[in-house]
Amino acid sequence: MAQSAVHPAPTTTPDALPAKLPLGAIAPWAVFFGVLMLVLLYFVGAEQGATSLLAGEDVHEWVHDARHLLGFPCH
């Protein structure tokens, strides 16, 4: 004969809740990742032609499919 045990749902107490992170601890990381995303967006979307920082077509070829995926024209 099979027996099933019903376990009571765990209760949360104020001591069990995670501590909140202060904004000062998150802000530098948010700025870092924001700048990183802008740099990546530049290389995917605008690194060619008059605004080119790097000579040659290497960056264009590396991010070619990403340009099409994001809707940037490149031809």
Image (cartoon, helix red, strand yellow):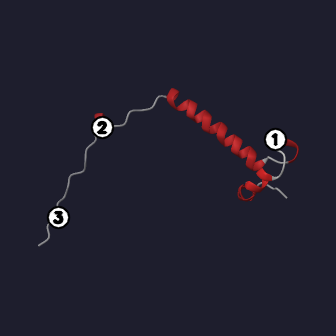
Q: Label 1 amino acid?
A: Leu
Displayed quadrant of residue 74 = bottom right
The answer to whether residue 71 shows anywhere in this view is no
The answer to whether residue 45 shows anywhere in this view is yes
68 to the left or right of 31: right
Q: Label 3 amino acid?
A: Ser
Q: Earlier in the sequence, mark 2 or mark 3?
A: 3
Q: Secondary structure at mark 1?
A: loop
Quarter of the image with the C terminus is bottom right
**For the residues marked 1 and 3, what is the alpha-carbon distance in whole angstroms?**
68 Å
Where in the figure is residue 57, as x and y percent of width and height? 82, 52
State the mark number for residue 4: 3
Residue to which mark 2 is pinned: 16
Quarter of the image with the N terminus is bottom left
Q: Pick out the residue farthest to the top.
A: 24
Residue to which mark 1 is pinned: 53
64 to the left or right of 21: right
73 to the left or right of 23: right
**For the residues marked 2 and 3, what is the alpha-carbon distance in whole angstroms?**
28 Å
